[in-house]
Every structure is written in structure tokens, then in C-alpha cells.
């Protein structure tokens, strides 16, 4: 039987590279490239998507300025919850805490549907043994629960191997396309104003931000980081730049590989638009790369599951310690110094959801993955807006000399508030559904936030601050 301690995670366990692995894994670069980006092209501005990834990267860099500045004063595993409470008060902090739990649990449960379907599609044609998608999801859940229960650096090592493979196969395709000169010669037409403004760039930008979900997790590991004053900013900026440059370059290569003028017909005429990456891989490199991508697509989903599981466990831990949730969640394992109660709680929630979804015969992609992912994307954008507002208020009061950071945080708030509005108005696109009933889901975020605000106002929240407010 595990013994527990109260309130202490394993300090000094993670360097900037390990934290970056958690962040990049949560973003799921191969899942985004194969599944999300073709949809962003279809409903957004088509071949102009690379420019939108540049814009999204700039917005996230502006956000990171205030986000990392807040991390100097608040070192807490419940980043959005703690930062918002610290900057905007208990009610806002309580709202952010419950929205964060809803959002991260939603996307983590949704990813089990994606993983199960992808694993089934990979294994069944080879073995000729039919197992339902939830069998594969259940096996993944057991292993992820075990990894999340143990020390955090073990998860980081697993993620490092999986993430490296994801990047390598996509970059291999990028290089194959550029070496071949693309469909009609390499060009920068994707960045021309007429191309960027075509279609619906606002919708495209909203969907681009969905591809970054998970990058904000750097500060979640602040209590377990080596030299957090240096590690957290370094990991945050490195992650934003790595993910942003990767998406911008890779989407530019895809646009050139398909052809600027042929991209949209390829997508609209395909029976499955998400086959675009694999179609181009076969055309420019051949079956070996396609097979590697299909295998790593499954491991990409697994890596995202593991990264989000670890983030959720730490949110449960932080909110238990902060008195927003039962104190038992604040216990850490005596040997591993992991938030094992939070980890088991998340595994239990996911298992319950998986049983209900399997019993209802829900489609693993159209229902299990897509709908929760839409809720999570909107919720996390709302959290980014709240954190930006918290940074503006806190820094203006405590560090007024950081004028540029305050301005950047204010701009980030405006951007994320606008994106949240777009995501709400176009929630049917985000959720991949034409039903008007789908707009009930944004109301769920509002209701959870309101409940969190009431709870936060009633509780004397306990936040973990950095040792000193350094000038």
C-alpha cells in the first residue's frame, strides 16, 4: 500500500528539455498535422494556413511574456487556476480551476477515442483479429495510469522517445517535398495577402490555435523543475517557437506538395480529408514513410494522453492543496513524490467515461474525440484570456516597470478574448457538427465556471508563491 505525504512534489526532477517534451507531446504534432490541419485548411483559408500559424505563434509569444512573468511569483502545479486567483481574485481563480479540470479531462477522454480507433485501424488489418476500439483504449489507460502514478521523470523519458519519432517522420516528408520541388516548383504564394485573406481566415486562425493546446503546461511543472526561474521561461519560449516553426514550415511544405491551386480540390474531393498527409507521403516518399506515419500516429495519440494525464493529476493536486477540492487530492506518494491520488482520480474518471461511451456505442472519432476536443479548445482559450488579464493586473501592481510585458499581456488578452468569441460563434465548425444543439456545450463551460466562481469565493484559497517577489 502506498504511503502519502501532504503537499510536496518531487523537486528538481525536470530540466527544460523534459518539460518541453510534456508540452510538445500534449500538442500532438503528428495528430494535428494528419487530422486537425486538413480540417483547418478546408474550413479556413486553405493554402493560406502557414501564415496563420505564424500569426498564432506571435500571439502565443506575447502571451508567454506575461505567463512566465507570473510564474516568477506563483510556483504552482495548477497554473491557470493559481495565476488567475493570484491576479484576479478567488472567484476568478475558482472559475479557472474548474474550467481547467473540465477542459483537460475532456480532451484526455476524447483522445482515448482517437487512440482506440487509430490502434484498431493499424492492428486489425495485420492480425485479422477484431477488437473494439475501447479495448485498445483500455489497455492504454492502464499503462498511462501506471506511468502517471510513478515519478514524473519516467513519463518524460517515454515522451522523449515518442515525440522525436513524430517530428522525424513529418520532417522527412517536408524534406522529400522540398527536394522534389513540390507540385509545381517551391514558392511563397501561401504568404501572399490575397491567399491569406481567402476563404475564412478567422475560422482558420481559431482552428490553428487548437493545434497548440497543451503548450501552456510548462508552468504546471514549476514545482518539479530544476532552477524554475530559468527553466520555466526557457521551456515555454522554446516550446512555442518549436511548435510554431514546425507547423508553419510543415504546412508550407504540404501546400507546395499538393500545389497551391490544387490543395482545396484535393481536400473537398477526398472521401477522407484527413488522408492528405498520408497521400503526400506516398507520393513523395513511398510506403515505408506511410507505414512509419501510421504507427507514429498511434504513438502520438498515446503521448498526448500521457502528457494530459500528468497535467490533470497536478491540477487535482494543486486544487486539493488550495482547498478548492478535497484535501486528500493534495497527497503525494512517499517514494515517487508524485500526485498519485490525483493520478488515480483521473484514471477513475476516464475509466467511467470510457465504460459509458462504449456502452452507448458512440463513434470513437465523431463523438468520443471530436466533441470533447471542441469543449477543451474553447475552455483553454478562455483560460488563456483569464491568465493574460491576471498578468496585466498583477504586473501593473507589483512590477510596473515591466511595461512591455504588460502591453504584450494586454494584447494577448484581446486576441484570446476575440478567439474565444469566434470559437463560440463557430462552435459547430470546431465540433464538426451542423446541429444547433451543439451550442449547449459552450454553456457547459459557462456553468462550470460559474460553479467554480461560487466555490472559490467561499473558500480561502491557499496558493504557493515563489520564495520572494523579485524585482
Image (spheres, helix red, strand yellow):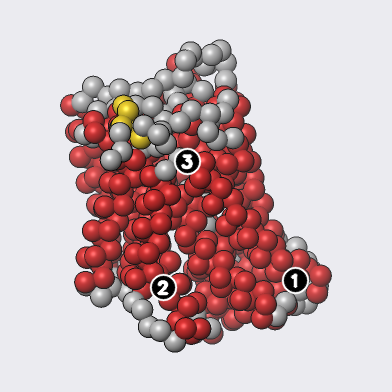
- Tell me the residue at 54%/14% (across/down): 470
Q: Secondary structure at mark 3?
A: helix
Left or right position of 375 against 29: left
Q: Secondary structure at mark 2?
A: helix
Which of the 4 image quadrants contains residue 144? bottom left
Task: Please tell me which of labels 1 and 3 falls first in the chain.
Answer: 3
Q: Which mark's residue is nearer the viewer, 1 or 3?
A: 3
- Tell me the residue at 56%/70% (across/down): 295
Q: Which mark's residue is nearer the viewer, 3 or 2?
A: 3
Residue topped by disc 3: 152
Q: Is residue 463 above or below residue 135?
A: above
Residue closest to the eye, 205 or 302: 302
Q: Which mark's residue is nearer the viewer, 2 or 1?
A: 2
List x then y, in percent, for residue 347. Answer: 31, 52
Which numbered disc covers residue 396? none
Residue topped by disc 1: 177
Residue closest to the eye, 102 or 11: 11
Contact check, label 2 and label 1, Cβ < 8 Å: no
Residue topped by disc 2: 117
Left or right position of 109 against 394: left
List x then y, in percent, for residue 76. Answer: 41, 29
List x then y, in percent, for residue 172. Answer: 72, 66
Q: How many marks?
A: 3
Contact check, label 3 and label 2, Cβ < 8 Å: no
Counting other residues with Cα less than 10 Å from the Cα at mark 1, is it few (<14), some (14-19), or many (20 or more)? Answer: many
Task: Please tell me which of labels 2 and 1 falls first in the chain.
Answer: 2
Left or right position of 330 against 282: left
Give me the C-alpha separation between circle 3 and circle 2.
28 Å
Q: Is residue 47 above or below residue 314?
A: below
Amino acid at each position: 500500500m502506498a504511503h502519502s505525504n501532504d503537499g510536496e512534489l518531487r523537486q528538481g526532477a525536470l530540466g527544460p528539455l523534459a518539460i518541453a517534451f510534456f508540452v510538445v507531446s500534449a500538442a500532438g504534432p503528428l495528430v494535428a498535422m494528419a487530422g486537425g490541419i486538413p480540417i483547418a485548411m478546408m474550413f479556413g483559408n486553405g493554402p493560406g494556413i502557414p501564415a496563420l500559424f505564424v500569426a498564432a505563434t506571435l500571439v502565443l509569444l506575447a502571451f508567454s511574456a506575461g505567463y512566465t512573468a507570473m510564474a516568477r511569483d506563483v510556483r504552482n502545479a495548477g497554473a491557470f487556476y493559481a495565476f488567475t486567483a493570484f491576479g484576479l481574485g478567488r472567484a476568478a481563480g475558482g472559475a479557472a480551476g474548474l474550467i481547467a479540470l473540465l477542459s483537460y479531462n475532456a480532451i484526455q477522454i476524447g483522445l482515448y477515442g482517437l487512440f482506440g480507433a487509430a490502434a484498431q485501424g493499424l492492428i486489425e488489418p495485420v492480425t485479422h483479429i477484431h477488437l473494439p476500439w475501447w479495448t485498445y483504449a483500455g489497455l492504454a489507460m492502464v499503462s498511462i495510469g501506471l506511468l502517471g502514478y510513478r515519478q514524473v521523470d519516467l513519463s518524460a523519458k517515454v515522451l522523449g522517445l515518442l515525440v522525436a519519432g513524430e517530428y522525424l517522420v513529418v520532417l522527412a516528408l517536408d524534406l522529400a517535398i522540398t527536394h522534389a520541388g513540390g507540385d509545381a516548383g517551391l514558392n511563397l504564394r501561401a504568404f501572399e495577402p490575397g491567399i491569406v485573406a481567402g476563404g475564412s481566415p478567422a475560422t482558420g486562425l481559431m482552428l490553428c490555435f487548437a493545434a497548440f493546446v497543451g503548450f501552456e503546461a510548462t508552468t504546471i511543472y514549476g514545482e518539479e523543475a530544476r532552477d524554475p526561474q530559468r527553466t520555466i521561461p526557457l521551456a515555454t519560449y522554446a516550446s512555442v517557437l518549436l511548435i510554431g516553426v514546425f507547423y508553419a514550415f510543415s504546412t508550407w511544405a504540404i501546400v507546395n506538395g499538393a500545389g497551391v491551386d490544387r490543395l482545396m480540390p484535393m481536400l473537398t474531393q477526398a472521401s477522407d480529408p484527413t488522408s492528405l498527409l498520408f497521400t503526400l507521403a506516398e507520393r513523395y516518399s513511398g510506403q515505408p514513410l506511410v507505414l512509419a506515419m501510421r504507427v507514429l500516429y498511434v504513438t502520438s495519440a498515446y503521448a498526448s494522453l500521457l502528457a494530459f494525464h500528468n497535467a490533470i493529476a497536478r491540477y487535482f493536486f494543486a486544487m486539493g492543496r488550495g482547498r478548492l477540492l478535497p484535501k486528500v487530492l493534495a497527497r503525494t506518494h512517499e517514494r515517487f513524490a508524485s500526485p498519485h491520488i490525483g493520478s488515480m482520480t483521473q484514471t477513475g474518471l476516464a475509466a467511467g467515461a470510457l465504460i459509458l461511451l462504449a456502452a452507448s456505442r458512440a463513434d470513437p472519432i465523431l463523438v468520443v474525440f471530436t466533441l470533447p476536443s471542441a469543449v477543451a479548445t474553447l475552455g483553454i482559450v478562455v483560460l488563456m484570456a483569464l491568465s493574460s488579464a491576471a498578468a496585466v493586473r498583477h504586473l501593473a501592481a507589483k512590477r510596473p516597470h515591466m511595461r512591455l510585458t504588460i502591453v504584450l499581456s494586454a494584447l494577448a488578452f484581446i486576441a484570446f478574448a476575440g478567439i474565444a468569441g469566434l470559437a463560440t460563434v463557430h462552435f459547430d465548425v470546431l465540433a464538426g457538427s451542423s446541429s444547433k444543439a451543439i451550442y449547449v456545450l459552450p454553456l457547459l463551460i459557462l456553468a462550470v465556471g460559474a460553479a467554480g466562481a461560487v466555490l472559490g469565493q467561499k473558500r480561502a484559497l491557499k496558493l504557493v508563491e515563489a520564495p520572494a517577489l523579485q524585482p
